[in-house]
Amino acid sequence: MTNCKPVSTPSHLKSSNSPGLTAAYSNPTFYRQLAGCLQYLTLTRPDIAYTVNKVCQHMQNPTILHFEDLKRLLRYIQGTLHVGLPLFRDKPILQSFSDSDWAGDVKDRKSITGYCNFLGSSLISWSTKKQNVVARSSTEAEYRALASTAAEITWIRRLLHELNCPQPTSTSLFCDNTSAIALANNPVFHARTKHIEVDCHYIRHCITDQTIQIHHIPTTDQVADILTKPLPAPRFKLLAHKLVQPLETPV
């Protein structure tokens, strides 16, 4: 793939339905080796985290279609060898972005959680992960994403405290779902939300002890959107630039 033609995004917006691509891939071991290597690359490339997550879900029985998706990812990487994580010398205030794609997996209809945490302007933590249960509403999916992000924030705040960099105020957590924000701040349980009671208790505890403070953010400004779904090229480039930027010395 060294001389392959680069592409602007790491994944297709829509999967192909061609019958010829559903057959099993002839060399699954090779597929697993490539997918495993790409997992290490996500340590410095959050822009490919979602696509690598999708690729790795098919390591047991990859098809030709899955290998085509893997090759597209390699074509994207070929065109972005010069980008990486930027680090800034600014005030080390922690802020987080949380998002979810409701029922994004067409096979099991489980949602995808994505979050990213910034220390000042520097990205220090991010995740793309399929949720363990099927969410019955977009609010539930977003709320479970908030719970995962809150747990990560709690751990980072404790780590920063040990490193003599305590956070003087509550960490701002940005979410684009107003219903999930209302549920997080509402101390009254409703019958239709009792099945997410554990997450409810945890987030409200974080809000009460001033670990986090949840704010609404327009979907257009939601940075974590890139970690939950495939995006059109213009929007992908806009969000990717907020996470990774060209390096001074290409690698």
Image (spheres, helix red, strand yellow):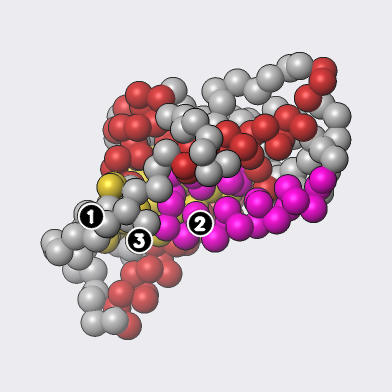
Residue marked by disc 1: 248
Residue 69 is situated, as x and y percent measured from the top left of the image, at 64, 34
For the magenta stretch, what is the residue range? 27-54
Q: Amino acid at mark 1?
A: Glu
- Height in image: 74 above or below 159? above
Secondary structure of the residue carrying tag 2 is helix
Residue 64 locus on image (x, y percent):
77, 32
> Within 10 Å of the Cα at label 2, are there few (<14), some (14-19), or many (20+) other Cα atoms?
some
Q: Give the residue at mark 2.
A: 41
Name the mark nearer the viewer: 2 or 1.
Answer: 1
Majority SS type along the magenta span: helix
Relative placement, left or right, of 53 versus 5 is right
The residue beneath circle 3 is 124
* Residue 130 relative to residue 117: left or right: right
- Where is 114 relative to 201, above or below? above
Rendered residue at 47%/43% (across/down): 77
Name the quarter where the C terminus is drawn.
Answer: bottom left
Residue 230's tag is none
Image point 68% across, 19% down: which residue? 16
Counting other residues with Cα less than 10 Å from the Cα at mark 1, is it few (<14), some (14-19), or many (20 or more)? few
